[in-house]
Image (spheres, grey):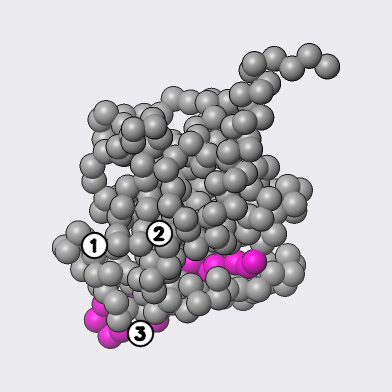
Amino acid sequence: MITTIGDLDRRLRQKEMEEKLKRMGKKYLVMSGKGGVGKTSICSSLALAKAQKGASVGLMDVDFHGPNIPAALFLEGRIQVDSEGRLVPMKARENLHVLSIQNLLTLPDEAVLWRGPRKLRAILQFIGEAAWPELDYFFIDSPPGTGDEALTCAKYISDLKAILVTTGQALSLVDAAKAYSFLLATGTSTIGLVDSMGDLICPHCKKEIIIHDKALVEALAQKLKLPILARVPWDLEAAGLSESLSKPIFEAAPSSVFTQKILELAEKL
């Protein structure tokens, strides 16, 4: 078989990416079947929790059409390029390195009009051609659903593990089951479910107000044979403090129920 220069180039890039992945520690894909379930908040908070403990953490945002990781971390500025032409992940905290398309856009409200092949190339570049340091943990915030972004990560990262975020809402549960079917089909190990926003912490009496029936998520967990890793509530007071201080809830309200649940979840990873 004749090997072209293009074939050699692709093989070299694939080898470079594989070598890079070996130095990226434990890898977690945080995904959901449905949007609006708190996935990005949980993903960014887990990364903060691990970095706070002294681990070297990478956080890659592959939600190209709704890249919210920078907003969740209150991370502004633009990604730099080093002398070798590699993207340099932004240092969001002492041990936390972040790469998101949002920090490459000229305008903050600019839409990303990409189809599958372009997104695939971007993800491979984000992994193999970026100047990531040696990492202990590598978190990936995936867009809702089972599209190109999650498929690319599942295909190219052999030791990837998934955390599936859902709420107790009927539509979210249906979509979570579909997302798990996707993970099974791609051979991606799923460590469990996160029951998100099932309770509301009252800002006045501090008691929990049940929004979604916990039994519905438990039934899904039994059906899928997955553990429920955590139940992460709404916390309006902590969210308000986050906005006023321009800090993520995890940092703005360290004693909040939300933050304590994230810390408990992080210990399981």
Q: What residue type is disc 3 on?
A: Lys
Callout 1 secondary element:
loop
Q: Which residue lies furthest to the front in this view?
A: 83
Against 169, is 266 above or below?
below
Q: Which amino acid does label 1 sit on?
A: Lys
Which mark is first along the chain, 3 or 1? 3
> In this view of the protein, can residue 125 be seen by the observer?
yes
Residue 33 visible (yes or no) = no
Q: Name the residue under label 3.
A: 207
Question: Percent x, y for residue 7?
Answer: 68, 21
In the rendered image, the quadrant that contains the N terminus is top right
| Amino acid tagged 2 | Ser
Q: What residue is disc 1 on?
A: 247
Residue shown at the point (66%, 55%) measured from the top left: 159
Element at badge 2? helix
**Front one among 29 and 156:** 156
Q: Give the range drawn in magenta.
A: 191-209
Secondary structure character of the magenta stretch overall: strand
Given residues 46 and 50, the one toward you in this image is: 50
Residue at 34% across, 32% down: 83
Q: How crowded is mark 3: few (under 14 residues within 10 Å), some or many (20 or more)?
A: few
Residue beneath the point at 53% across and 39% down: 128
| Figure check: 143 above or below 177 | above
Q: State which tag comes first along the sequence, 1 or 2.
A: 2
Please state if 52 lies on the left or on the right of 210 as rendered: left
Q: How far apart are marks 1 and 3 (CA)?
A: 24 Å
Q: In which quarter of the image is the C terminus?
A: bottom right
Residue under label 2: 44
Gap in Å between the C-alphas at discs 1 and 2? 12 Å
Circle 3: element type: loop
